[in-house]
Amino acid sequence: MSDEPQIMSTADRLVYMAHQIARNLATMGEAKATATLAEHLASFWDPRMKERIIAMAQEEPDRFSSVVAAAVARLAGGRPVPQDQATPFNAVNEAGHCDAG
């Protein structure tokens, strides 16, 4: 067995992230976790990420837990709020706002 780290594809990473968020929401119960996950995806994921995970859920539904599948279906149906809560990226050489820039 190789000691080299496994590199995830973009698709694998999206599935992993969605399930990781769903696991963190599991204590809410399935209905609330589904709604919260859908809102999170709508609010914080890049439009390309959203398009990709929606397409994957339709093409490979077996890759998704029931909570993630339901949240992505809700996202695809346009029910979550549009992206309006994402933290703005910093301008070049600007401090503050978010840790991504």
Image (spheres, grey):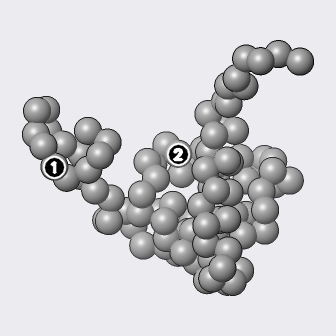
As displayed, is residue 11 above or below residue 2? below
Q: Residue at x 63, y 82 (%)?
A: 28
Residue 59 falls left or right of residue 68 = right
Q: Residue at x 11, y 33 (%)?
A: 93
Within 10 Å of disc 2 (Cα), the crowding (few <14, some 14-19, many 20+) is: some
Question: Is tag 1's residue or tag 2's residue first in the polypeptide sequence?
Answer: 2
Residue 4 falls left or right of residue 53 = right
For badge 1, the amino acid type reads Gly
For badge 2, the amino acid type reads Met
Q: Which quarter of the image is occupied by the N terminus? A: top right
On the question of residue 90 being in view, the answer is yes
Residue carrying label 2: 49
Helix, strand or loop at label 1? It is loop
Q: Quadrant of residue 68?
A: bottom right
Helix, strand or loop at label 2? It is helix
- Toward the viewer: 24 or 75? 24
Q: Quadrant of residue 73?
A: bottom right
Q: Which mark is residue 96?
A: 1
Q: CA distance from mark 1 to mark 2?
A: 25 Å
Residue closest to the far front: 3
Across the whole image, how many numbered discs are drawn on residues? 2
User: Does the CB distance between marks 1 and 2 fall below 8 Å?
Assistant: no
- Toward the viewer: 3 or 53? 3
Location of residue 88 in the rendering, given as x and y in whole percent from the top left corner: 23, 52
